[in-house]
Image: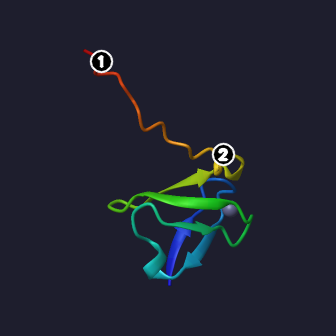
Amino acid sequence: MIQVECPECGERFEVESNVLFLLNRFYCSVCDVMLEVIEEEPLVLDVVDEEFLEDDDVDEDDDWGVE
Ligand SMILES: [Zn+2]
């Protein structure tokens, strides 16, 4: 287990080391907020705002290279 600090509530809690890989998401065991690993070395966690999780429609015809 590895101790991490929640950026939301500031409390420390332990997670399995195998969840700490880049862009993985897991929940704070203290405040239940969803966290995402945004940096592995050094470890940086960020809060994921779940209200925006479904806002995932990447615009694929991104034509900023219009001729
Ligand atoms: Zn927390």
Which label belongs to residue 66?
Answer: 1
Rate crowding at label 2 as few (under 14), some (14 to 19) or many (20 or more) other CA atoms within 10 Å: few
Q: Position of residue 18 (x, y in %)?
A: 44, 81
Is residue 38 positioned above or below 26 on the image?
A: above
Rate crowding at label 1 as few (under 14), some (14 to 19) or many (20 or more) other CA atoms within 10 Å: few
Residue found at the far top of this picture? 67
Is residue 62 positioned above or below 33 on the image?
A: above
Ligand 1, seen in the image, is in the quarter at: bottom right
Residue found at the far left of this picture? 67
Lower position in the chain sequence, tag 1 or tag 2? 2
The residue closer to the viewer here, 1 or 33, is 33
Q: Is residue 24 left or right of residue 12?
A: left
* Label 2 beta carbon less than 8 Å to ligand 1: no
Which label belongs to residue 38?
Answer: none
Say what amino acid the circle numbered 2 marks.
Phe
Q: Position of residue 44 (x, y in %)?
A: 45, 56
Say what amino acid the circle numbered 1 marks.
Val
Instruction: Give the labeled residue for mark 2.
Output: 52
Circle 1/circle 2 CB separation < 8 Å: no
Secondary structure beneath label 1: loop
Residue, x 51% and y 82% (percent of image)? Answer: 16
Secondary structure beneath label 2: helix
Q: Position of residue 33 (x, y in %)?
A: 69, 60
C-alpha span from label 1 to label 2 = 30 Å
Residue, x 49% and y 41% (percent of image)? Answer: 58
Q: Position of residue 17 (x, y in %)?
A: 45, 80
* Label 1 beta carbon less than 8 Å to ligand 1: no
The residue closer to the viewer here, 7 or 63, is 63
Q: Is residue 47 left or right of residue 23?
A: right
Is residue 25 positioned above or below 60 on the image?
A: below
Residue, x 73% and y 66% (percent of image)? Answer: 32
The part of the image, by quadrant, that contains residue 11 is bottom right
